Amino acid sequence: MRAIFALLIVAIFVFLGVSANGNKCGENEAFQRCGTGCERTCNNGDDWDKPCKLPCVDKCFCQDGYLRDSSGSCVRAWRCNPSL
């Protein structure tokens, strides 16, 4: 019984450690649980208001005012097309 309890405690700490490390985001990003499966990017920024049929995902998303560029970085929306 003690062995099962000890394994349960270890499993909880491992899970918490993995969860905490998985939430580290890059510059201009924030972690969201069950965020949209249709992230706004420089390529689809104008279509963001269309319904998303993909399931939600737990990941880092660009903060408000930022879009993901082709290199995967979150940049200000105006930087996606500086000629506008």
Image (spheres, rainbow, N blue to C red):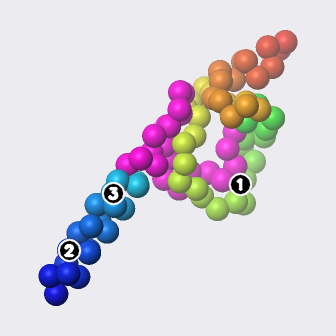
Q: Which residue is mark 1?
A: 52
Element type at marker 2?
Answer: helix
Three-letter residue code for mark 1: Cys
User: What is the x, y in percent for residue 46?
Assistant: 78, 34
Q: Residue visible at 28% across and 60% down? A: 13
Question: Alpha-carbon distance for marks 1 and 3?
Answer: 30 Å
The answer to if 3 sits in the magenta stretch is no
The answer to if 21 sits in the magenta stretch is yes
Residue farthest along the bottom direction in this orientation: 1
Placement of the C terminus among the 4 image quadrants: top right
| N-terminal-most mark, 1 or 3 | 3
Element type at marker 3?
Answer: helix
The part of the chain drawn in magenta is 20-40
User: What is the x, y in percent for residue 11?
Assistant: 31, 68
In depth, the one of 21 and 41 nearer the eye is: 21
User: What is the x, y in percent for residue 30?
Assistant: 49, 37
| N-terminal-most mark, 2 or 1 | 2
Residue 16's tag is 3
Q: Is residue 79 above or below residue 45?
A: above
